[in-house]
Amino acid sequence: MRILITGGNGMVGKNILEHHKTSNYEIFAPSSSELNLRDYNSVNNYIAKNKPEIIIHTAGLVGGIQANISRPVDFLVFNLDMGRNIIMASKENGVKYFLNMASSCMYPREGQNPLKEDLILKGELEPTNEGYAIAKVVATRLCEYIVKENPSLQYKTVIPCNLYGKHDKFSPENSHMIPAVIKKIYEAKQNNAKEIDIWGDGLARREFMYTGDLADFVFYALENFEKMPQNINVGLGFDYTIIEYYQAIADVIGFKGKFIYDLTKPIGMRQKLIDDSKLKQFGWKHQTTLLQGIKKTLDYFKSEVIND
């Protein structure tokens, strides 16, 4: 089958392209210079020309708390444009299978954990990444509406928990927590620093899954598309505190210093844990433990980022 993957140069896209099951498909993964997802005509013409049977939409403007707070317009508009254009052009060209990659940040900030798929639009969003979340909600609802109008189309949404892994961003402005902490603690160890600062009190809880596992889920989903739920959470089903992540990363790197808590910094939601009931029923489970994932990500950081 012919698959179009958007965002092939991003973390999720690259992990999908490196999965061993790509050999079972004919895959198109155009760069942003080859396919401008913010231009509807460009997207429509590309799909009409290449005639993919499945589209996996992983493209997006992504970043951590700092980036989301400083650029809310871009995080809303860029992601809204890309999602709308790729979904509507797929519908216009009769593409039957569409896998939309969303985010657990779509859930209400006060939503009861673990977060179930039916909580979307049931409460106020987390302000620190609201723009990005709104764009993801729109794309998710659009897929639902298309299926409602035409049940023969299979436009479904994957809602991953937080991710980390190979091809992640490690810059302080754009990185998510785990790669940022890996870089911070690695450099502290190199510089013989005695302490590390943690944003907030370290008690907020987060669920992070290794991106290679999400790539594995994508191919499982392609093989079982008809029985996959309309919206499905994909994650671990359990979480850790920020302190536990810092300690695990420090243990892997061998950092022995102290942690200092900066209570002036934003921390986002106190907890964001997905409900994995539908995922279990669907028959898939992650394979990579936290320590395994940190070691793999650290190896990538040392070989590809530092030595780049």
Image: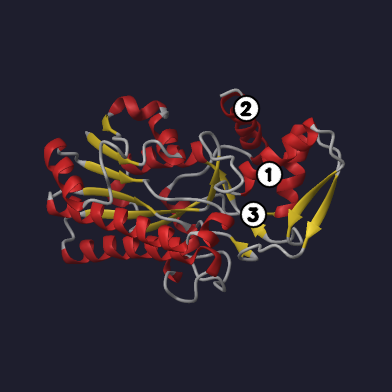
Residue type (three-letter) at the residue carrying disc 2: Ile
Which amino acid is tagged 1?
Val
Q: Find disc 3 in the rendering and name its residue.
A: 239
- Which residue does the numbered mark 1 point to in the structure image? 181
Considering the numbered disc 1 on the image, is that residue within a helix, a strand or a loop? helix
N-term-proximal mark, 1 vs 2: 1
Question: Which callout, 3 or 2, points to the residue nearer the camera?
Answer: 2
**Residue 160 placement (x, y as % from top left):** 47, 52
Q: Secondary structure at mark 3?
A: loop
Q: Is residue 250 left or right of residue 297?
A: right
The vertical placement of 111 against 49, above or below, is below
Q: Which mark is residue 306?
A: 2
Most extreme residue toward the bottom is 123
Residue 307 percent location from the top left of the image: 60, 23
Residue nearest the observer in this picture, 181 or 191: 191
The amino acid on which the numbered mark 3 sits, given as a three-letter code, is: Asp
- Asked if residue 14 is positioned above or below residue 56 in the image, the reply reads above
What's the residue at 56%, 45% (across, down)? 209
Using a 10 Å C-alpha cutoff, classify the residue at mark 3 as few (fewer than 14 neighbours), some (14 to 19) or many (20 or more).
Answer: many
Residue 57 in view in this figure: yes
| Residue 258 shown left or right of residue 216 in the figure | right
